[in-house]
Amino acid sequence: MTALHLADAGEAADLAAFLARLIHYDRAAAVRLQGSGTALAVFGRPPSFEVLAIRTARLAKPYENGLDASLDVTVSAGELLESIDESAATALVPTAVTGPPWAGVLPPRGGWRQEPGLPAPDTVRAMVASAVTEFRSRIGELAPERRTRAELDRIGREIWSRPIGDTELPVRAAHAAQSLGFLRPAARAAVPNEAALALLSSGTWLRLRTPYGSIAVRRAGLGALDVSVR
């Protein structure tokens, strides 16, 4: 079984926290692992957010058992979480599983460029909080007979599809970032506030990058163009 040697206990703890959050939304969650050398990327898709979450981790050394060049496999998030030994900063790669459809379509590796118009981190967090409050308020105002799944989905789509600032990034991307622990308050960030968030684009993809992970989402209305199938 392939052993991952993470750079330190902090990397192991952060990876475990990310996996735990994914499992909170989907107990049967799968993640796609891609790694080369001493860099590991973990891709996951929390249900309902309609985004792709990306968490990177630093490895202390390349993989064992002959996998010293690259790694690309889809596995159970729960099994990977159970294998993490935070004190030893290690994890074992579980047996591969048949990945969900999203695992075959990932954002491009290169060609990213920064996009203007993203508000300051505090403003983005405030937009998420306001959207959550509005959603709860509007749901609470519904008569019991109108509180159907279709109506809840309609309200959710209206609120979470709104753009953030002068960008095409929907609020649901920032909501996902906050729910997965990527959108932390500036006081806890290890980088200056102005560098805490960045919006990047490549083809039909938008990526909200934070110091703790990224959220990727397809631009609205562009269909299945420019996908990267791997």
Image: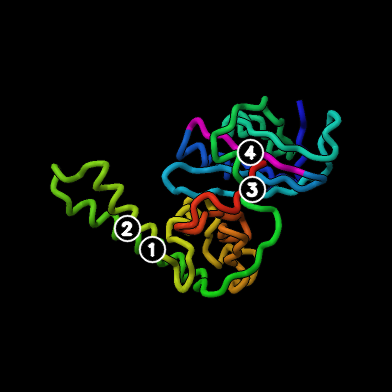
Label 2 to label 1, Cα distance in Å?
Answer: 7 Å
Q: Is 116 above or below relative to 9?
A: below
Q: Nearer the N terminus, badge 4 or badge 1?
A: 4
Q: Distance between the residues labelled 2 and 4?
A: 30 Å
Identify the residue at horizontal 17%, vertical 51% (top origin).
142
Query: Helix, strand, or loop for circle 2?
Result: helix
Upstream in the sequence, badge 2 or badge 4? 4
Q: Are marks 4 and 1 in contact (CB under 8 Å)?
A: no
Distance from label 3 to label 4 (Cα)? 14 Å
Q: Indicate which disc, 3 or 2, sits on the residue closer to the N terminus.
A: 2
Residue 198's tag is none
The amino acid marked with disc number 2 is: Glu
Q: Which disc, if any, is residue 158? A: 2
Q: In this view, does 131 lie to the left or right of 52?
A: left
Asked if the residue under mark 1 is in contact with the one under mark 3, i.e. CB atoms within 8 Å, the reply is no
Quadrant that contains the N terminus: top right
The amino acid type found where label 3 is placed reads Ser
Q: Badge 4 is on which residue? A: 32
Query: Residue 138: where, in percent of width, then height?
Result: 23, 56
